[in-house]
Image (cartoon, coloured by chain):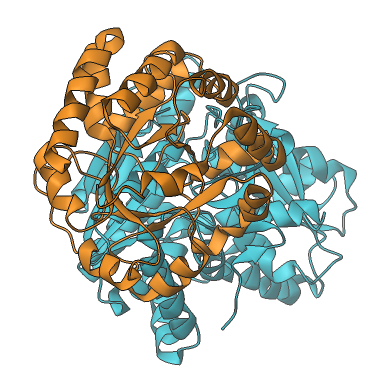
Chain colours: A orange, B cyan
């Protein structure tokens, strides 16, 4: 069983997925945060590669992209860092990246380095079903799973999406970009029912408090938290390990 | 259905899953109305009665004589209502949005020409209009900001990234994905995910159709060369499209070389860029080795874009069209030249095409017809050009 499947195979326990932007505020902190979050009870970690034009992100993660670029972080630094982290961390690690960063790097070399570093999968927000073919074969060659997304607007597309999906389905809670929402109204639960257990489903976008995480987890197999963690990193910088750990523990407690 | 999702390897639909349903609906609606005689008749009526089409094809006698080569014609898209070719596309898209039951349009703008056209047509058709404009561009084109507001639009300055056109596109995409049901995103150029590049081209191809019939009528033959400026590339594709099958006609696009393509300050995408993926499409972009999009620069806010329409990327690869780079200095000289030679002040964007024609015309024969697409008028640029030449005036 690969690592992603393991994250969702915990006898009814909901998977907690955490997102942070690589190199925010620097690559050493990204490493420490991954290790701390894994210990605090995160089941899967997504690392965003900082990009000049993160068009799917709200202001919190957009600013994290700017900080990541300002710290000089490239995808090569992330590969090296994950290789280090893999000495102690066994939970699945995914890269969240815009398609251009893979395309410019060269898909072959990119997937090969993912495999070497121990990266289990990719989330590419600007690759819908129609363009999944761009990297799919190369991903398969190097054992890197490409995660598909499901949105509230995907009603007529579920079957086709599920048919080719692997790992888990990243279910977008609501319209819009990433970021914290004070109230979270979602119809994604109806879509998840139609997935009919063919693949684990995790809900992300706007999940920012332990209470919201609990509510969303009831609709799915797991929840994805990004902006709320990134906001703590923005506020605490190099001292963010403690508050991020406390936050993860609070969410974990609420979920279990 | 005419499937033009890709142009060779370029184009596509590189957008979030959330947007796909809306893009599918738009694709279907456009495929339907494209073949609908009522829609086409309504659009023609707007083109003729509101914009003032067909636009003139003006024989630039003084310019032709002074340069001593080709016989030069100017396609006067600057005479359209709102002062540029942008209105052609906006009329088409807003009419379509209205048929689709949308209540609101959003648009990005660089120089403000597309934003002004969008605000104008929204006022005409009774839709709400929200324009996103890079903060730096709102400063460069302050008059156009007020013009859009005068027309009833809301203008939001975009503070992120380089605060120019590409960031305005990012902001518009983010707004669209937040509010899909009642909103249509009127993309201003032949960029973005399919169906936009082909649809915007279809609304702009009237330019080349008119050039062809006007030149044939006056000269009894096809032009030798058609020249247009290229940012995203909508006026250029409009001026080229009906000539694509006429292989004798040379098609030349002029990119912004800013302070020179050997400097870091330019927007010469095809001349210096690499293939990449952004804003829903695969095409050429100015980017670094890791795929980070580079800040671009041009004196012209309308050409200040790091990418180019995917159909141009394809025409570049197949060599059906040629692309050259024109510097700020050359464009400003051409801006003065056309103003003083023909009494026509061109948009600084269009002045890039004029500049290349000035270089090329003397090498051509007197019976060669050279057409310059004068995509917009230069009133909006007067204050900026004065500042460029060291004269500090208020708009």
Which residue occupies the foreground of this view, B294 or A121?
A121
- The image position of residue A68, as x and y in percent, is 43, 20
In terms of image quadrants, where is residue A243? Answer: top left
Quadrant in the picture for the N terminus of chain B: bottom right
Which residue occupies the foreground of this view, A156 or B231?
A156
Residue drawn at (48%, 58%) of the image: A128
Q: Is residue A214 left or right of residue A36?
A: left
- The image position of residue A231, as x and y in percent, is 23, 25
> In the rendered image, is residue B7 in sight?
yes
Which residue occupies the foreground of this view, A24 or B259?
A24
Placement of A118 over or under B111, stated as above or below: above
- The image position of residue B65, as x and y in percent, is 78, 46
Q: Is residue B332 left or right of residue B181?
A: right
> In the rendered image, is residue B75 in sight?
no
Placement of B184 over or under A223, stated as above or below: below
Quadrant in the picture for the C terminus of chain B: top left
Residue drawn at (28%, 54%) of the image: A221
Placement of A12 over or under B285, stated as above or below: below
- The image position of residue A141, as x and y in percent, is 69, 49
Residue drawn at (45%, 15%) of the image: A27
Furthest toward the bottom, the residue is: B37
Residue drawn at (24%, 43%) of the image: B155
């Amino acid at each position: 069983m690969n690592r992603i499947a393991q994250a969702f195979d915990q006898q009814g326990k909901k998977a907690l997925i955490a997102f942070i932007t690589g190199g925010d505020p620097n690559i050493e902190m990204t490493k420490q945060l991954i290790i701390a979050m894994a210990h605090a009870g995160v089941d899967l970690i997504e690392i965003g590669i900082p990009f000049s034009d993160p068009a799917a992100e709200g202001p919190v993660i957009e600013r994290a992209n700017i900080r990541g670029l300002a710290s000089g972080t490239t995808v090569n630094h992330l590969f090296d860092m994950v290789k280090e982290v893999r000495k102690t961390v066994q939970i699945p690690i995914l890269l969240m990246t815009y398609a251009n960063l893979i395309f410019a790097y060269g898909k072959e070399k990119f997937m090969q380095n993912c495999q070497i570093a121990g990266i289990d999968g990719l989330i590419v927000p600007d690759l819908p079903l129609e363009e999944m073919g761009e990297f799919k074969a190369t991903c398969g060659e190097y054992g890197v799973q490409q995660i598909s997304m499901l949105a509230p607007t995907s009603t007529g597309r579920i079957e086709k999406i599920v048919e080719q999906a692997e790992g888990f389905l990243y279910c977008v809670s609501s319209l819009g970009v990433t970021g914290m929402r004070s109230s979270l109204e979602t119809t994604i639960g109806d879509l998840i029912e139609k997935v009919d257990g063919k693949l684990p489903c995790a809900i992300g976008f706007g999940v920012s408090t332990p209470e919201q995480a609990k509510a969303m987890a009831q609709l799915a197999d797991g929840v994805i938290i990004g902006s709320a963690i990134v906001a703590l990193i923005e506020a605490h910088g190099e001292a963010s390990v403690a508050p991020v750990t406390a936050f993860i523990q609070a969410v974990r407690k609420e979920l279990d | 259905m005419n499937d033009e999702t890709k142009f060779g390897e370029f184009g596509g639909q590189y957008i979030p899953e959330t947007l796909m349903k809306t893009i599918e609906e738009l694709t279907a609606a456009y495929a339907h109305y494209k073949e609908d005689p009522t829609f086409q008749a309504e659009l023609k009526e707007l083109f003729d009665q509101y914009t003032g089409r067909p636009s003139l094809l003006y024989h630039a006698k003084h310019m032709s004589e002074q340069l001593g080569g080709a016989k030069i014609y100017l396609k006067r898209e600057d005479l359209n209502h709102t002062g540029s070719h942008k209105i052609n596309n906006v009329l088409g898209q807003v009419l379509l949005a209205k048929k689709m039951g949308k209540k609101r349009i959003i648009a990005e703008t660089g120089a403000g020409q597309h934003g002004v056209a969008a605000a104008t047509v929204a006022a005409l058709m009774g839709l709400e209009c929200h324009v996103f404009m890079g903060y730096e561009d709102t400063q460069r084109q302050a008059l156009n900001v007020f013009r859009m507001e005068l027309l009833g639009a809301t203008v939001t300055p975009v503070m992120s990234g380089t605060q120019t056109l590409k960031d305005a596109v990012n902001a518009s995409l983010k707004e669209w994905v937040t509010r899909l049901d009642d909103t249509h995103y009127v993309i201003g150029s032949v960029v973005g995910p399919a169906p936009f590049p082909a649809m915007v081209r279809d609304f702009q191809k009237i330019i080349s159709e008119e050039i062809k019939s006007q030149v044939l009528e006056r000269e009894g033959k096809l032009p030798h060369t058609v020249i247009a400026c290229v940012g995203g590339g909508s006026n250029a594709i409009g001026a080229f499209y009906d000539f694509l099958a006429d292989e004798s006609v040379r098609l030349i696009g002029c990119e912004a070389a800013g302070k020179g393509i050997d400097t870091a300050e330019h927007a010469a995408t095809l001349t210096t860029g690499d293939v990449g993926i952004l804003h829903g499409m695969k095409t050429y972009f100015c980017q670094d080795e890791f795929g980070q999009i580079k800040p671009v620069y041009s004196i012209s806010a309308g050409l200040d874009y790091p990418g180019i329409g995917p159909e141009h990327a394809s025409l570049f690869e197949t060599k059906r069209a040629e692309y050259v780079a024109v510097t700020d200095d050359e464009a400003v000289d051409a801006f003065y030249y056309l103003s003083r030679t023909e009494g026509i002040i061109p948009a600084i964007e269009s002045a890039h095409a004029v500049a290349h024609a000035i270089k090329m015309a003397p090498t051509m024969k007197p019976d060669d017809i050279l057409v310059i697409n004068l995509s917009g008028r230069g009133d909006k640029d007067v204050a900026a050009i004065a500042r460029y030449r060291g004269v500090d005036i208020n708009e």
